[in-house]
Amino acid sequence: MDQKRELSSIDLGALVTELNRYEGAKVDKAYLYDDDLLRLKLRDFDRGRVELMIEVGDIKRAHVADADHVADAPGRPPNFAKMLRNRLSGADFAGVEQYEFDRILTFEFEREDQNTAIVAELFGQGNVAALDETGEVVGALSTVRLKSRTVAPGAQYEYPASRLNPLDVSLGGFKRHMRESDSDVVRTLATQLNLGGLYAEEVCTRAGVEKETPIDEATDDQLSALHDALSRIGERLRSGDVDPRVYEEALDDGSDAESEERDPRVVDVTPFPLSEHEGLPSVGFDSFNAAVDEYFYRLEHEESDAGEAPTDASPSRPDFEEEIAKQERIIEQQQGAIEGFEEQAEAERECAELLYANYDLVDEVLSTVQEARENEVPWEEIAETLDAGAERGIPAAEAVVDVDGGEGTVTVALDDEDGGSVRVELDASAGVEVNADRLYQEAKRIEGKKEGAMEAIESTRRELEAVKERKAEWEANAAADDGSNDTDESEEEEEYETDWLSRSSIPIRSPDDWFERFRWFRTSTGYLVIGGRNADQNEELVKKYMGKHDRFFHTQAHGGPVTLLKAAGPSESADPVDFSEATLREAAQFAVSYSSDWKDGRGAGDAYMVDPDQVSKTPESGEYIEKGSFVIRGDRTYFEDVPCRVAVGVQCEPVTRAIGGPPSAIVDRAATSVTVEPGMYAQNDAAMMVYRDLKGRFADTSFVRKVASADQLQEFLPPGGSDIVD
């Protein structure tokens, strides 16, 4: 069976109770691994060191980890980690809440000078956002701009639309939601009631109801049994009555000796035993947090072991079928969500139309309640008065089925065209038109979610087609290799080694070059080009790193970096170099692309080149030179209409890292790359788009996040807006 890779809403509900036991722990430091794993190191007075892990990539989890399960701190912290360290260092952990029944946790941290909330979105693409005391986004791993919500620095954080909590819904509400479906019991529980597949099946099993029973054939007794099973699960979670289990894959009786020496694969972790896993071996734990930590620790090591390529055998075939099946499952779930949105939107419009169809009756109900409230009649007395009116047969009073003073609402039951009854909750302080308009607006909002889901399903379909194409290419290459008997084995191996996109595991070979803190690239002819990121680096490049045989480049437009085409490294002796025209133009394109020409949205710009002895910090009499600026004397060589265009990619040999620069220098050097030009997407948004694009091209899905995270790719993108070139 498939291994669990994401915590469910029920799992998070169980974890929240346990995580709140660490309230009062102080934050020491924040770390970010691979652009999607956040580690908060805390100190607790009673428990000592506490490691809070939040992962929002392919794996989605949030729990406290055993110190022995925590990897060594990564290298230079990216901007997001720096921001968290600044805001959270010395702060007290004030608690965590689950947002309604969604896979969202909000961690609160308090400090004398400022409070901070960390919102972990453990669904979809996954995200982590840091909020200030007003709920404004200070920073986020990913910027989200949708019709329904925005998560971006400077904007108020917006939670996704509320979802029905199946653990709190009343029996009447449960039956109504179930009856509104035209599917079977288990699919309705999974999608309309938001339980997900596993727990939907578990509820059916506990209630003794056949999973595939069509909703229109389900009896009231069966629905009551399902609701009872749900309620018992909810009560158990709220009381903290957990009996955690890590489930393992059942081994066949005929397992060989080698498999018996290894631990069986973990497949699931749950806060209590599940009937659906009755045939699987399991390990019990004292706390659900400990079980979750052990599960994901073992899962990570199992995948690492599986990813090690044998040294004396040919590379294994990537599991295209599993990836295709995964994408098809996602599409099926997305289609179910779209159907659900359509049903919800239609239900909201029907309710609005029923208000107008029963205008006089609804208006009488609202007017009666509003008049009573103006006379300061208590809500309890209003409810009693309406009950008495219903007993006397007053139609308006008979229509009222609930009065909620806490929410200021009145719920009425109205007859629909099919002879059924539809409940509509009304804002008691508003009129019929306002209540109807609210329902119409809600229908529009839900349809907006449907549009987002349709965009997502198109994206998933593209991913599915990409996997199928990679499978076809792999099989074609394998067939060609099998038929080439006259090819030298070493040549075959070399040809395969360069097919990095299809490799199931790519070894990491991290470089440590002196120039990486500057902007840099290597020309197509192999020469190093470096540029300053700011005025300080511009000064440093000229004073410390500019050799007498180098070339100095700058743009005609103000606000460009100092760019040096190096004849040799800083500790190497250099001879005069006759740089090719292609090499010079690449250096000029680098200077133009990282200048204000890009930031201003220009498609091209002009640059010039001089020798090092023409560059001076000595101004003319009466002039002043700003930091990072220089005086250029003598003739200049100009490069006109140089295109603003940059390629960003992943290099796999001889080292593994992100690279970027003029496309002519990058495309052939990278295993794969994406080309960008001045456009509309902010630098961090463009970096995330490029990251996701590159990540999807590799069969080794973890490789890109290890060597070319969005933060690392962003360092190669010019300041200003960008668009990906098709």
Image (tube, rainbow, N blue to C red):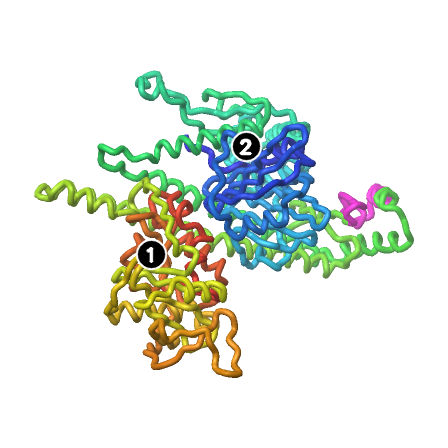
Residue 283 at least partly seen = yes
Residue 507 x, y percent position in the rendering: 32, 41
Q: Secondary structure at mark 1?
A: loop
Callout 1, which amino acid?
Ser
Magenta residues (range): 385-408
Q: Secondary structure at mark 2?
A: strand
Residue 285 x, y percent position in the rendering: 56, 22
Quadrant in the rendering for residue 284: top right
Residue at 70% x, 50% y: name it: 114
- Marker disc for residue 452: none
* Mark 2 or mark 1: whose residue is earlier in sequence: 2
Residue 164 x, y percent position in the rendering: 62, 42
The quarter of the image holding the N terminus is top left
Residue at 48% x, 36% y: name it: 71
Residue 402 inside the magenta-drawn segment? yes
Residue 189 x, y percent position in the rendering: 55, 37
Residue named by callout 2 = 65
Above or below residue 351? Residue 59 is above
Residue named by callout 1 = 571
Residue at 27% x, 36% y: name it: 316
Above or below residue 553? Residue 286 is above
